């Protein structure tokens, strides 16, 4: 196959307009030149790409496959042009990193700050998303890296261990569940909760787990962040669930009980995730190594 970028753009324009003439005009080519390019692509593949009909053209199965790959290739070319243009203007490389709530709040601030201090020509576009949405973004090329929990299926992507991140149940003083050393999530669902914000990835996940148990999370109030949850639980507003790391970091009075959740999904492992770590830009690979090294340091403490 000997296709150039003009061929690929032309073919996509033909698919989008459903017409070779309109596709040629959109590609700033003459009709004769566009027709010759399509014939050359078909000859190179030894397969028809378009079915000619009275009102235009439709892609054959081979044409549909070419269209999918052409979109991906041209998207990558656009990203390449943007990155190189930024370097030419003295701008920075950027890593698109998606992560869940506890990663964003508890595990990333220090490692990311250290990395940014050591790499002044790299910026990080950091966004909070539930793990399933992170996987979707990685598969569709709208993120470079993700940090997900091992509760989701990422078998079609590459992963590396990042941090252990178990969830802990917080029980306020005098609560009926206070005497329990360990509880399953389903045993808590008849009681009221201090929940995270409705947009929080962990908040969404916990509400989904409640529905899987056949009940709804009884939310008395929502707090902004783990500290807010712990402060409200400490003053008796209801139960709460936060990462164990947030409890360990808590500097306030420990008037609440912190009890491990016995559910397998609550004893989670965070994973670094990408389509292909080796295919990432050099500065993104450096970020992966920095985060992996931070995990090793945390494990040794």
Image (cartoon, rainbow, N blue to C red):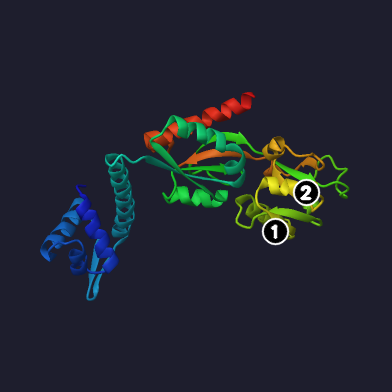
The quadrant of the rendering that contains the C terminus is top right
Q: What x and y, as percent, mark residue 63?
A: 28, 59
Query: Is residue 48 visible to the viewer in this orientation of the structure?
Result: no
Query: Is residue 210 visible to the viewer in this orientation of the structure?
Result: yes
Q: What x and y, as percent, mark residue 277?
A: 43, 36
Q: Is residue 235 above or below residue 30?
A: above
Cα distance in 3D space between marks 2 and 1 = 23 Å
Q: Residue at x 37, y 37 (%)?
A: 281
How crowded pointer 1 is (Cα within 10 Å; few <14, some 14-19, many 20+) is rated as: few
Query: Secondary structure beneath disc 1?
Result: helix
Query: Secondary structure beneath disc 2?
Result: helix
Given residues 12 and 256, the one toward you in this image is 256
Q: Is residue 216 left or right of residue 18?
A: right
Q: Which mark is residue 79?
A: none
Q: Which mark is residue 233?
A: 2
Q: Residue at x 64, y 55 (%)?
A: 197
Q: Is residue 48 above or below residue 95?
A: below
Given residues 244 and 123, the one toward you in this image is 123
| Residue at far top of view | 300
Given residues 117 and 240, the one toward you in this image is 117
Q: What x and y, as percent, mark residue 296?
A: 57, 26
| Residue at far bottom of view | 54
Q: How many marks?
A: 2
Q: Residue at x 74, y 47 (%)?
A: 231
Q: Is residue 36 left or right of residue 264?
A: left
Q: Nearer the viewer, mark 2 or mark 1?
A: 2
Q: Which residue was labeled with disc 1?
A: 211
Q: What x and y, as percent, mark residue 36?
A: 13, 59
């Amino acid at each position: 196959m000997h296709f150039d970028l003009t061929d690929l753009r032309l073919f996509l324009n033909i698919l989008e307009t459903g017409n070779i003439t309109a596709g040629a005009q959109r590609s700033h080519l003459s009709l004769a030149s566009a027709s010759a390019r399509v014939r050359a692509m078909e000859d190179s593949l030894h397969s028809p790409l378009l079915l000619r009909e009275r009102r235009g053209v439709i892609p054959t199965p081979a044409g549909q496959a070419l269209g999918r790959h052409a979109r991906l290739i041209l998207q990558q070319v656009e990203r390449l042009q943007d990155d190189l243009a930024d370097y030419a203007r003295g701008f920075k490389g950027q890593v698109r990193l998606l992560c869940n709530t506890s990663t964003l709040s508890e595990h990333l601030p220090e490692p990311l700050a250290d990395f940014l201090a050591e790499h002044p020509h790299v910026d990080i576009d950091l966004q909070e998303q539930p793990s399933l949405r992170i996987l979707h973004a990685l598969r569709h090329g709208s993120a470079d890296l993700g940090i997900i929990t091992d509760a989701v299926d990422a078998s079609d992507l590459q992963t590396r261990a990042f941090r252990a991140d178990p969830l802990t149940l917080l029980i306020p003083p005098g609560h009926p569940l206070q005497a329990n050393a360990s509880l399953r999530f389903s045993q808590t669902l008849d009681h009221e909760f201090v929940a995270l914000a409705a947009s929080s990835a962990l908040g969404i996940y916990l509400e989904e787990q409640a529905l899987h148990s056949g009940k709804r999370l009884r939310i008395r109030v929502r707090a902004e962040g783990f500290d807010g949850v712990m402060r409200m639980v400490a003053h008796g507003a209801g139960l709460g669930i936060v990462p164990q790391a947030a409890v360990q970091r808590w500097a306030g009075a420990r008037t609440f009980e912190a009890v491990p959740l016995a559910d397998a999904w609550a004893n989670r492992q965070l994973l670094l995730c990408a389509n292909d770590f080796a295919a990432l830009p050099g500065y993104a690979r450096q970020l992966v190594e920095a985060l992996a090294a931070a995990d090793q340091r945390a494990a040794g403490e």
